[in-house]
Amino acid sequence: MGMEGIGASVVRKEDKRFITGKGRYVDDIKLLGMTYAHFIRSPHAHAKVKSIDSSAAEAMPGVVAVLTGRQIVDDKVGNLICGWAVTSKDGSPMRMGAWPAMAPETVRFVGQAVAVVIAESKNLARDAAEAVVVEYEELPAVADMPSALKPGAPQLHPEAPGNVVYDWHIGDEAAVNAAFSKAANVVSLELTNNRLAPNAMEPRAAIADYDAAEEHFTLYTTSQNPHVARLVLSAFYNIAPEHKLRVIAPDVGGGFGSKIFIYPEEMVALWASKKVGRPVKWTGDRTEAFLTDAHGRDHISKAEMAFDADNKILGLRVKTHANFGAYMSLFSSSVPTYLYATLLSGQYNIPAIYAEVMGVYTNTTPVDAYRGAGRPEASYLLERLVETAARQLKVDPAELRRKNFITQFPHQTPVIMAYDTGDFNASLDAAMKAIDYAGFPARKAAAKAQGKLRGIGLSCYIEACGIAPSKAVGSLGAGVGLWESAEIRVNPVGTIEVLTGSHSHGQGHETTFCQLIAERLGVPISQVSIVHGDTDKVQFGMGTYGSRSAAVGLTAILKAMEKVEAKAKKIAAHALEASEGDIIIENGEFKVTGTDKSIALPMVALAAYTAHNLPDGMEPGLKESAFYDPTNFTFPAGTYICELEVDQATGKTSFVNFVAADDFGRLINPMIVEGQVHGGLVQGIGQALLEHAVYDSNGQPVTASFMDYAMPRADDVPSFKLSHTTTLCPGNPLGVKGCGEAGAIGASAAVINAITDAIGNNKLEMPATPDRVWHAIHGNA
Amino acid sequence: MSTVKLTVNGKAVSVEVEDRTLLVHLLRDHLNLTGTHVGCDTSQCGACVVHIDGRSVKSCTVLAAQAAGANVTTIEGIAKGDELHPMQAAFRDNHGLQCGYCTPGMIMSAIDIVHRHGGELDEATVREELEGNICRCTGYHNIVKAVLDAAGRMKVAQAAE
């Protein structure tokens, strides 16, 4: 490892612009002649749009246009799509209700747009929106899944009778029934996984700029995957063919999944820009983010686990209802199915698993992938169930886990996934040592002597990352392949540009991707630039989510790099009159092994471009590209342990210690990896203690600002003790697994297991607010 | 419309704005100082924090007119040329930022925290004082480290002056 190579905690290259206020986010961009959009949104959860009178607004000074849902439908802008086809148990396809970018007839959640005002300034657009009169006829609404599934419940979509999207299953029901019939003990648990709002700190924004002469659109957007946005906008929404649409995602202020999707606002901005003949900018405010960014989680589940007399797991049976909100968002269908139920084996050897998942429409904001996407729900369910089992079977929770760990790899689970490698005992041992697990009973007793309830909770998570092998996901219904592309351009003076389809919005790719080049060529990272986020610069890419950037994106760069090195070695060998096989690369030089003959990278690059003396038949230039499609998912795993105290009088929890032992395979930049873990842990802790997107029974959102929705703040959370154990991923040449979601996947179960341990009552739902904890302590929950 | 005269990052400026214009919009839209961000519109998140006469203030909660005559410092105004402010350097060195969106507000708040507490900062105090700045990326761990690190650097810098 060099100073800046793989494994070095290199300080980030991108930081200078962010710490000096020179980041360039979408809302920072101004175009000549730009107009501003303000959306008119439904105040009702379910209603017919009777009429829209925009005459007063249109007469106001500075108003350019008022456009409605009827017009966008008439102009044949396509309905929003869901890109993953999930089939019900009975073989029927999932039932999709039509979702136009603005509603022409029926609104199905509070915040759904019915019209947009385009004006000369943000304030004028907002003022004019007040003057647009929309007449609604209210319809009865269903805000939660039990209400939506009742006979006679109000129906959202004629396409989906009973408000059911699909009724899906996985696994072997007969095998599970057989396992339960011979069980010595059965442990069961009912639990909810609370709905969350992703809340990237940068609200979504879009600027659309139509060039009538070229019939060409440019879209600046807050996207995690600008190429996917262009593909969907072109192929499904009829905005423009791909070569007439450039999508740029500049600096993006966090995503966590919420900026994967192509939203109505981008579609409307593009369409409106052509209609008014000027650039159109929309910047969401925080309340619009709460109303329209796809939410996360929102499951209700019942789980049962069968054990033999020796406390070995025999089988697992799970029934889950997943709330999709009012419409099927872009990847929503895959989240509670192929991203959730396929991880229900966890770290355990479970011979038989059967899971049923019913997708349900409600009059709420659509739900889709949020950090972890299905895997946090699986991990929370399983880790609470195993902890419950340990208490019921009166065995140590660490020992019960250890007894059931998978120890032989590769391991085929009963739910599709084939784990390639891992060492679950190693991460459990590391976490137990870090928190002094053996000393806990004494600490609990000491706390009790002082009137405090102290608890400890474990969570042994596994996730499937490096999303994803295209052929595998295609066979499961995905509408796209999930490879990644890369291009490496060595310039004539030896500087290097790496073009990648992985977008960076906080992950540090501008640094870590350079570290690979530094490792291979021995050049300083200052000599390398990472180019991403612009469909005119990078040919294609699938974007950043699912902890895929290192395992898939960086591997694509490695594949391109190998081609660059092969050609450069040929040029060097020719120049040095040596055999190609004798050339080695060291510190930016191509050397003839065993001699003092060498040629520096800039001279090789220059030779490639002057082409005065290249080997016979070689093309000039030094630029290579690669598409890399992984052969399997990667399987990061680890153990989190939380120790905390509960105040009996108030129900408030206080962290004592929180340790994490993760196996991410090879670490490219440990500093950045640990930053990802810290952030994920706090999102998991936020879900466990604070966060909940709440609707009243009429579908009115109760939590639509940071004054109502409890975001984790600095004084809500602890500092963390992190450690790493390592099994290299055999599925990619770098041995990396991915680290972006682990914290959010594993943390919430550790927290709730610790609280329920402290208070001696297992009946507790997230978020475990002081009110809920107090009631759980005092028995009237 | 009103004319607001103030000093921003050491330069006297005179800006004609609508009366309802907030300071953050004067900075972003009229002076093109886009380092100051809007994250919540309700004075909760702190992405818009600037200094007015040396004290940290959420610029989404101040009318531009209220800043008339004041000395406003934004994230763009704290480095001395190429030399970063110790708080900026500490955020970089401790990986106290990821997406960068909350970072300018965090840094401006943190500088004020160090000024108010001098060298007497500890982790609990930093966490309590940062309660008005929300970060969704870092989990605060490295931000807290950065502020404590910077407090030391600023003390040394002050002693040297």
Image: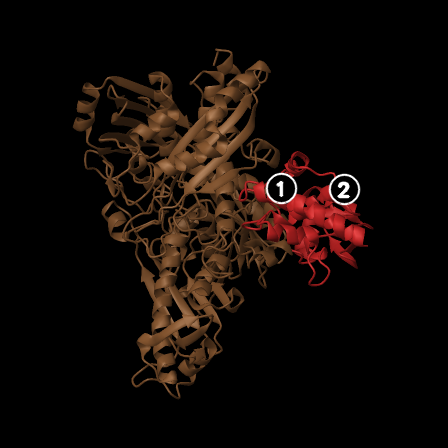
Q: From the top left corner, tell me how far across and down residue A640 is, in percent.
A: 44, 34
Q: Are marks 2 and 1 in contact (CB under 8 Å)?
A: no
Same subunit, tags 2 and 1: yes
In the image shown, does A273 or A488 lie closer to the viewer? A488
Res B61 visible: yes
Q: Chain of mark 1?
A: B
Label 1 amino acid? Answer: Val
* Residue on which disc 1 sits: B144
- Supply the letter of whichever chain is red: B
Q: From the top left corner, tell me how far across and down residue B15 is, in percent.
A: 75, 56
Measuring 41% from the left and 43% from the top, which residue is drawn there?
Answer: A725
* Residue on which disc 2 sits: B118
As displayed, is residue B13 above or below residue A288?
Answer: below
As displayed, is residue A431 above or below residue A393?
Answer: below
Q: From the top left corner, tell me how far across and down residue A233 is, in percent.
A: 39, 55
As displayed, is residue A555 above or below residue A365?
Answer: below
The hue used for chain A is brown
In the image shown, does A602 or A363 lie closer to the viewer? A602
Q: Is residue A251 left or right of residue B76?
A: left
Q: Is residue A775 left or right of residue A80?
A: right
Label 2 amino acid? Answer: Gly
**Mark 2 and mark 1: Cα distance apart in space:** 16 Å
The secondary structure type at the circle numbered 1 is helix
The secondary structure type at the circle numbered 2 is loop
Q: From the top left corner, tell me how far across and down residue A502 is, in percent.
A: 42, 56
In the image shown, does A264 or A187 lie closer to the viewer? A187
Name the N-terminal-most of marks 2 and 1: 2
Examine the image and state in which quarter residue A347 appears: top left
